[in-house]
């Protein structure tokens, strides 16, 4: 009897250890996100909107990532905005890593090749959106398939996407699909050349929706900078612009930043272009928490047609959790 009890005890112990081990090995979902908020004051006098100040929650991201295997994962991100209380599915995709030749495949609501990549160079998205995002010429995410990776000893970085084209906030309106591609080549350490192309149709009528970007970036330990030119076409309307920005870390937790955007929403028309100037500083006050102070000016080509020039002061908060 004692032998049977010993055998049963050992078997029970083995089963318990196996159960605990299986529970420990089971991948758990990682939950995190970002919060962008600011306080702004409009210094423009005798102009609408004049002398307005308010607190804003500009973005709330809630992300859950689950690792399935050492080469696959699923990710979902919800995006909330104020003050209109809108909620969107920003990302919801499955990703397979290192499928072939250091390449990755994504399927679902996927990040698009340009905006997220530019944000990584910009370093201060919590202070202002990218130029292409503000101008409304590119989507940061869309529904479709993505293919990305590195070539030539990792000196070439590419990202391809086949998507609906309307973006993650708008329903598909036709059977046409957009093809977007970004290729970045590191010429020497820290200096990269960038090319981006988006080819698609904007409506069920089959009107063009094309974008072309060419630029160069420089990234070192303390300095991050980029300049690029944009050409876009929506149906018969041609658009053009460029963005130049940079940041310099004068201390381990303090960086100065500057940016200049210029955009012409119709190159064949007059009095419809504008310039944006952003200057300020960003400080990391703790792990995952940043504060920014910036002055932002918008100058219009024709204030009679487009409205008065605007000057804003922003105090921005970025939290990563």
Image: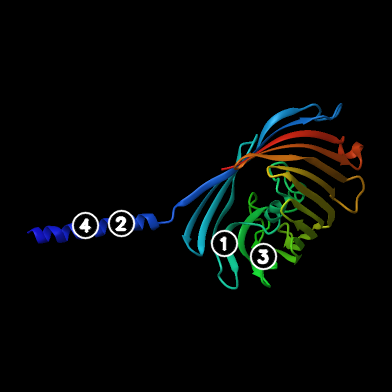
> In the shown orientation, is residue 234 left or right of residue 107?
right
Badge nearest the viewer, 4 or 1:
4
Query: Between marks 2 and 4, how big is the CA–CA gap?
Result: 10 Å
> In the shown orientation, is residue 69 left or right of residue 40?
left
Query: Between marks 2 and 1, how big is the CA–CA gap?
Result: 33 Å
- For this orientation, the residue located farthest to the left is 1
| Residue for badge 4 | 12
Counting residues from the start of the chain, the first of labels 2 and 4 encountered is 4
Q: Quadrant of residue 128?
A: top right
Query: Between marks 3 and 1, how big is the CA–CA gap?
Result: 12 Å
**Quarter of the N terminus within the rendering:** bottom left
| Residue for badge 2 | 19
Q: Secondary structure at mark 4?
A: helix
245 in relation to 198, above or below? above
Badge nearest the viewer, 2 or 3:
2
Mark 2, other Cα within 10 Å: few <14 / some 14–19 / many ≥20: few
Counting residues from the start of the chain, the first of labels 3 and 1 encountered is 1
Q: Secondary structure at mark 1?
A: strand
Pointers 2 and 4 in contact (C-beta within 8 Å): no
> What is the tally of numbered marks visible in this picture?
4
Task: Judge whether residue 116 can be spotted in this image.
Answer: yes
User: Residue at horizontal 65%, vertical 64%?
Assistant: 162
User: Residue at horizontal 61%, vertical 63%?
Assistant: 145
Q: Quadrant of residue 318?
A: top right
Question: x, y (%) of residue 51?
Answer: 80, 26
Which label belongs to residue 107?
A: 1
Counting residues from the start of the chain, the first of labels 4 and 3 encountered is 4
In the depicted view, which residue is nearer to us: 321 or 311?
321
Pointers 4 and 3 in contact (C-beta within 8 Å): no
| Residue for badge 3 | 160
Question: x, y (%) of residue 29?
Answer: 47, 51
């Amino acid at each position: 009897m004692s032998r049977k009890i010993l055998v049963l005890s050992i078997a029970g112990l083995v089963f318990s250890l196996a159960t605990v081990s299986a529970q420990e090995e089971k991948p758990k979902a990682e939950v995190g996100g970002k919060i962008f908020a600011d306080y702004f004051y409009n210094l423009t006098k005798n102009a609408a909107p004049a002398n307005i100040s308010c607190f804003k929650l500009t973005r709330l991201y809630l992300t859950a990532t689950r690792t399935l295997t050492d080469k696959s994962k699923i990710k979902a991100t919800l995006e909330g905005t104020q003050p209109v209380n809108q909620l969107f599915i920003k990302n919801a995709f499955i990703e397979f890593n290192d499928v072939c030749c250091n390449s990755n495949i994504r399927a679902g609501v996927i990040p698009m090749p340009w905006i997220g990549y530019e944000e990584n160079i910009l370093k201060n998205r919590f202070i202002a959106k990218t130029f292409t995002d503000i101008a409304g010429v590119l989507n940061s995410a869309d529904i479709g398939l993505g293919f990305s990776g590195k070539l030539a000893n990792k000196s070439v970085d590419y990202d391809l996407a086949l998507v609906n084209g309307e973006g993650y906030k708008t329903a598909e309106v036709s059977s046409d699909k957009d093809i977007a591609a970004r290729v970045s080549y590191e010429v020497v350490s820290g200096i990269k050349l960038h090319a981006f192309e988006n080819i698609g149709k904007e409506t069920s009528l089959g009107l063009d929706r094309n974008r072309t970007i060419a630029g160069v970036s420089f990234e070192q330990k303390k300095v991050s900078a980029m300049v690029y030119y944009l050409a876009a076409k929506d149906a018969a309307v041609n658009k053009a612009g460029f963005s130049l920005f940079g940041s310099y870390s004068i201390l381990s937790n303090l960086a100065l930043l500057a940016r200049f955007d210029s955009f012409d929403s119709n190159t064949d028309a007059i009095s419809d272009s504008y310039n944006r100037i952003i200057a300020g500083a960003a400080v990391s006050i703790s792990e995952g928490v940043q504060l920014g102070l910036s002055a932002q000016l918008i100058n219009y080509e024709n204030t009679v047609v487009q409205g008065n020039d605007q000057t804003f002061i922003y105090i921005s908060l970025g939290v990563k959790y």
